[in-house]
Image: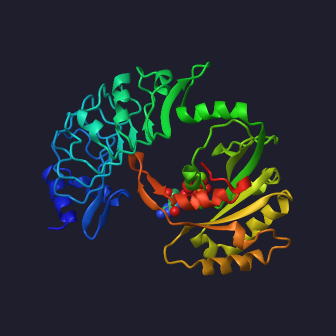
Amino acid sequence: MDDLEKLRKIFTEIDLSDSIDQILNSKNTKFVNRKLIWLDLGCVLEDVQEEIRLGEFTELTYLGLYANNLKILPVNMFQGLHRLQYIDLGENNLDELPEEIFRGLEKLDALWLYSNNLRALPVSLYNLHNLRELNVNLNKLNFNSIRELRTLKKLERLEVALNPEISPIELAKLKFGKLKYLIVDDTLPDGNIIIKNLYEIQEEEDSHTRSSKVIFGLITGFMGSGKSTLIKHIPNKIQTDITPDIQPRLFFDKHFMIKYSPDTNLVLFELDAPTISTWTQYISVSEFVFVLISEEDLSKRDDEFKEFLEHIIKNRSRESRVLLLVTKVSKGTKKKTINSNLSSIVERIDDCPIDLSHDLFLVSMGNPFPDLGGQQKVNLNEKEIQLIFNSIKPLNKNLS
Ligand SMILES: Nc1nc2c(ncn2[C@@H]2O[C@H](COP(=O)(O)OP(=O)(O)OP(=O)(O)O)[C@@H](O)[C@H]2O)c(=O)[nH]1
Ligand SMILES: [Mg+2]
C-alpha cells in the first residue's frame, strides 16, 4: 500500500473521509516518490478526540495540526516519526503536553505552539538540540520555562509574545547562545500593544547614539519577484522610524535599517513596480536601487521590464547605483543566457549606468518549507545575499 492509500484508510477509519480532499489539496501536503513528506491536518480535526496513528509515515518532515481545538495529545503522537522537522500545533486548546511527547525527534527544526493555554513546557522539549525556531506566543508560560531554553544551543528564533507572566525586561538580561530573534510584546503609552524583536530594539538604541548619517536604498520589482523574501534574509536588520522626507508620506510595506559604515546607516524600503511609477521622488532620494526580476518574468515580460527600468534610470539621482537581481533562478540556468537577455534590454535604454559585470546578481531558487498555520517560507542561499550586500559596502567590509 502506498502512502496515499494509507492516508485514505486512516481517514475512513476515524470517519473523516470528507476531509481528505481538503488535505490533499493543501499546498502543505506533499508526496515525493509516493511517500508522504508534508501533511497538513490544519482545521480538519475539529472536535475529534480519536487518536490518529501516523507512525507509518516514516518520511514525514512536516506535520500541521493547527487550529483543531485539540485539548490533549497522546504521548506517542509523534512516535516513529524520526524525520519530523516542523510541527505546527498552534491555535488549539492545549493546557499541557505529555513530558515525553517530543522524545526522539532529533531532526526537529521548528516547533509552533502559539495560541494555546500552556503553563509549562514538557521536559522532552528541552532536549531538542537541533531546534532552531520555537513559537510559544499567546500562552500562559512563566519566566522559568523560558529561561531553561538556554540549553538549546541552536535556537535562533524564539517567540514568547503575549504570555502575561513574562517580562521583556527580565528576558533581555538572559544570554541565549545563537538567538537572533526574541519576539516579545510591549504596551505603548496609549494602551496599544506592539510586537517587537527585543534584539533589534537594543541595537537601534546603540546605533542611534553612534551614527549620525543616514542614506536610503530602494528595493523594487514586479509583484511576486521575491522582494519580501530577500528582505527576510538580510541579516542584522534594525527597526527604524526614519523615512525619506517626502510629502505626502507613503506607507512602507517593509522598511528597516542596516549598518552601512561605522558612521552611516542605510535605510531600505520596499516598493512594488506599480507604486514606484507614482512615487517617483523615492527613486531620486535613493543611493542604491535594487531591482528584482524573476527568471520567468525576465523571459516573459521583457518589454514591460525595459519600461520599468527606464523609468528608474530617468528618475534616479546621478550618484546612485542601480543593481539588478535576477531571482528564482533554477539550477540548470546558465549565467550567459541571463546576461544576454539582460544586455539586450539594457542596450536599448539611453544613458544606462548598469554594468552587467558589476551590477548583476543571481539569486538561485530557494527551498520552500511550511510556515505557521500552513503558509510557506523560502530559504535562500545566504552566501548570495552576502555577496550582493558586500558589493555595496564602503571599504568592502563584510555585512555582519
Ligand atoms: N520556490 C521559491 N519561491 C520563492 C522564491 N522567492 C520567493 N518565492 C515565493 O514567491 C512568492 C512571492 O515572493 P515575495 O517575496 O512575497 O515577493 P514580493 O516581491 O515581496 O511580492 P509583493 O510584495 O506581493 O509584490 C512567495 O510565495 C514566495 O514564497 C524562491 O527563491 N524560490
Ligand atoms: Mg512583498
Q: Quadrant of the N terminus?
A: bottom left
Q: Quadrant of residue 320?
A: bottom right
Q: Quadrant of residue 11?
A: bottom left
The answer to whether 116 appears left or right of 361 in the picture is left
Q: Position of residue 248 (x, y in %)?
A: 80, 41
Q: Position of residue 207 (x, y in %)?
A: 68, 35
Rendered view: 111 above or below 277: above
* Residue occupying image coordinates x 38% and y 41%: 153
Query: In the depicted view, which residue is nearer to us: 353 or 260?
Result: 260
| Rendering quarter of residue 99 | top left
Residue 237 in sight in this render: yes
* Residue at 26% over, 49% down: 106
Q: Quick check: 41 above or below 294?
A: above
Residue 117 position, x and y percent, is: 32, 28
Give whichever of 26, 82 is nearer the camera: 82
In the rendering, at what x and y percent does residue 221 appear?
66, 60
Looking at the rendering, the quadrant in which ligand 1 lies is bottom right
The residue lying toward the viewer, choosing from 399 and 60, is: 399
Q: Is residue 142 visible?
A: no
Q: How is the image coloured?
A: rainbow
Horizontal side, residue 91 vs residue 304: left or right? left
| Marker count (numbered) | 0
Identity of the residue drawn at 62% across and 77% down = 338
